[in-house]
Amino acid sequence: MPNKNTGRYNVTQKYLMTRGQAINFPAKFFNANFKKNDVFGVVIDIPMSSDVLTTMVCFINGAANLYFNNGGEYTGASQRYRNLVQATHTLVANAGQLLPKCEKTNKFDLPVDRTSNIFLLTKGGIYKTEIKAGVLPAEEVEKRNVYVLYQRVLAELRSAQLKDDAEARKNR
């Protein structure tokens, strides 16, 4: 549960390390010739409840993983589910529209309260913006677009989790 005074989430060392590695993932691992401000990855801290913080990590190759503040994770689904790869690629390929609304950063604080952090990974550095809980104003088109796209990735990840769980039950 977030500390009532600070709105901060309790996190494990594993979560912090994995999140840090994702945010600082180098572009050289992709077979692409990225320009300085081409987005190759998107890392989004998503408060799920008052005590659950999820970080979704998405890359241009369609890889998408979830990491939870309690140290749990859901990884590898992109290797099995084409719809997830497509949704993830679409998110990352379109995330560049958000770049003008972001600030370049080298600080990767965890979100406070119900605010989501969005980090855009480029060869030229890491850029950040936030989405506050509640309704996104109509004039924030870029944030709305990226929000819709990352909700699609979350839905595909949830679908993959349900399929994996069903398969695991079947094989018991």
Image (cartoon, grey):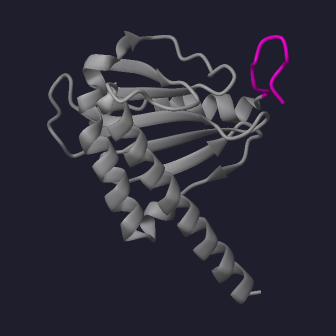
* Above/below status of 24 relative to 41: above
Quarter-of-image position of residue 79: bottom left
Which residue is drawn at the image coordinates 80% and 25% (left, top)? 2
> In the picture provided, is 30 more to the left or to the right than 170?
left
Q: Is residue 5 among the parts visible in the rendering?
A: yes
**129 vs 142, nearest the viewer:** 142
> In the picture provided, is 33 more to the left or to the right than 17?
left
The prevailing secondary structure element of the residues shown in magenta is loop
Where residue 164 appears, as percent x and y from the top left, is 61, 73
Q: Is residue 52 magenta?
A: no
Q: Is residue 61 among the parts visible in the rendering?
A: no
Quarter-of-image position of residue 120: top left
Number of marks in picture: 0
* Above/below status of 16 relative to 126: below
Residue range of the region highlighted in magenta in the rendering: 1-10
Where residue 60 appears, as percent x and y from the top left, is 30, 46
Q: Residue furthest front?
A: 138
Where residue 103 appears, as percent x and y from the top left, is 36, 12
> In the picture provided, is 83 more to the left or to the right than 132?
left
**90 vs 121, nearest the viewer:** 90
* Above/below status of 140 relative to 4: below
**On-image quarter of the C terminus:** bottom right
Which residue is drawn at the image coordinates 45% and 30% (left, top)? 136
**5 vs 21, nearest the viewer:** 5
Which residue is drawn at the image coordinates 18% and 42% (left, top)? 32
Which residue is drawn at the image coordinates 37% and 52% (left, top)? 88
* Above/below status of 23 relative to 84: above
**On-image quarter of the N terminus:** top right
